[in-house]
Image (cartoon, rainbow, N blue to C red):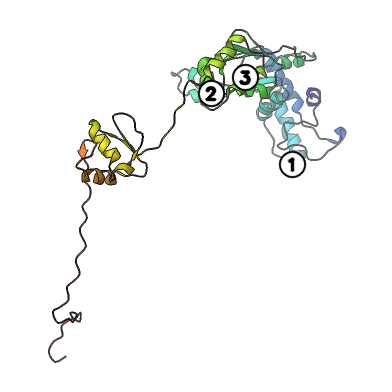
Amino acid sequence: MYTAWWRGGAWDEARPDAEILRLAPEARDSSPVGVIREMVLDALRELGEGRWVPWEAVAGYVRDDTRTAGVARLLRRWAERASIEPPSPLDVARRIALESLPALGAIDLGIIDIGNVNPDDEDPSAELGPTLRLTPRGRALLSGKHPTTEPIASRFIDSQVLRVGPQTRVAAVLGLQPLVEIGKVGGQIDVILTPTSLARALSAGVEAEIVKARIESVAPMPDTLSRLIAQASVVVGRGTLVQSSGFLWVEDANIREMLRSRRQTADLFIDPSPPGGLLVHPSVDLERLARRCRALGIEIASDGQVVRSRSTIPPPSPTPPSSTGRRPSTRPPTREGE
């Protein structure tokens, strides 16, 4: 794929869209993108050998190259023939560095950590942007060698630190995400399995057997880690959750027993309740609780104030019938002569 990209024609970063027609190589009107590819690769050789380089540094290298002005004129003429907007050399270089080369596995992409930016800068956000680093595969391709991958397996370098090897499947490494903390990230990736991270995974609902299976899919576990998982997954007791709307503190044990056993208030509380009070049933509101307890002579306080039940006005009594047995007339009085 790298050779096909380098030859050009079928993979052209100057085009705004992908190739639509399958044309023969001699029938394609290729853009002068090959020169810009050489500029980007030269910048990576000189600036990014074994370290991270900001994209702005690569862009500055392309901008200052003596070939850039001539390539801009060639791109403009090619765009006129292709009936498209002429791209700038920097736009094409950005697509090469941030899209094509990462897809080929030649470079790694990163971002600048905002926490490491100097707060004294006038506009630190203007300096932020992607960073690039040549991968071992990219260094081999740029030097004309065939890239090879060493068959290094993942292994535990101590009882808690797992070093991920290049032969490990990406899905297996991603499966460790709920269990580990990120350690060293450089030429190799180290993940750390701590008692805190394992306890957090178990509390989130990941079973101990699944934890072991995910770790063993990457590397064999040491005995100390197996014992740690076994200890963290031990069930020492069990509790039952009971929903309630509140807890009524009652210091007098006799009053608690009266409220719990009397017919007027027995259905208000959950039995058994913990010592020192009574759990209020979820369907009971404060007004009902206060009214029932007050009927037994017990006041309920909430937020330092005694709860008073709302008094209801009795409905008006019906009008008694007259002594003659006739109902009173509801017609309005009329004036004389009407």
Please state, as top left, top right, bottom left or bottom right, where the C terminus lies in the image: bottom left
Residue at figure coordinates x 24%, y 43% from the top left: 293
Task: Say which label, 3 or 2, has the lower sequence index.
Answer: 2
- Name the residue carrying label 2: 202
Query: Considering the numbered disc 2 on the image, is that residue within a helix, a strand or a loop?
Result: helix
Mark 3: few, some, or many residues within 10 Å (few <14, many ≥20)? some
What amino acid type should be assigned to the residue bearing mark 3? Lys
What amino acid type should be assigned to the residue bearing mark 2? Leu
Residue at figure coordinates x 75%, y 12% from the top left: 151
Residue 97 shown left or right of residue 256 in the figure: right
- Name the residue carrying label 3: 212
Mark 2: few, some, or many residues within 10 Å (few <14, many ≥20)? some
Residue 328 shown left or right of residue 142 in the figure: left
Query: Considering the numbered disc 3 on the image, is that residue within a helix, a strand or a loop?
Result: helix
Q: Is residue 155 above or below residue 3?
A: above
C-alpha separation, residue under disc 3 versus residue under disc 2: 12 Å
Query: Considering the numbered disc 1 on the image, is that residue within a helix, a strand or a loop?
Result: loop
Would you identify the image quadrant in which residue 246 lies?
A: top left
Please state, as top left, top right, bottom left or bottom right, where the N terminus lies in the image: top right
C-alpha separation, residue under disc 3 versus residue under disc 1: 60 Å
Image location (x, y in percent) of residue 51:
63, 13
Residue at figure coordinates x 72%, y 24% from the top left: 36
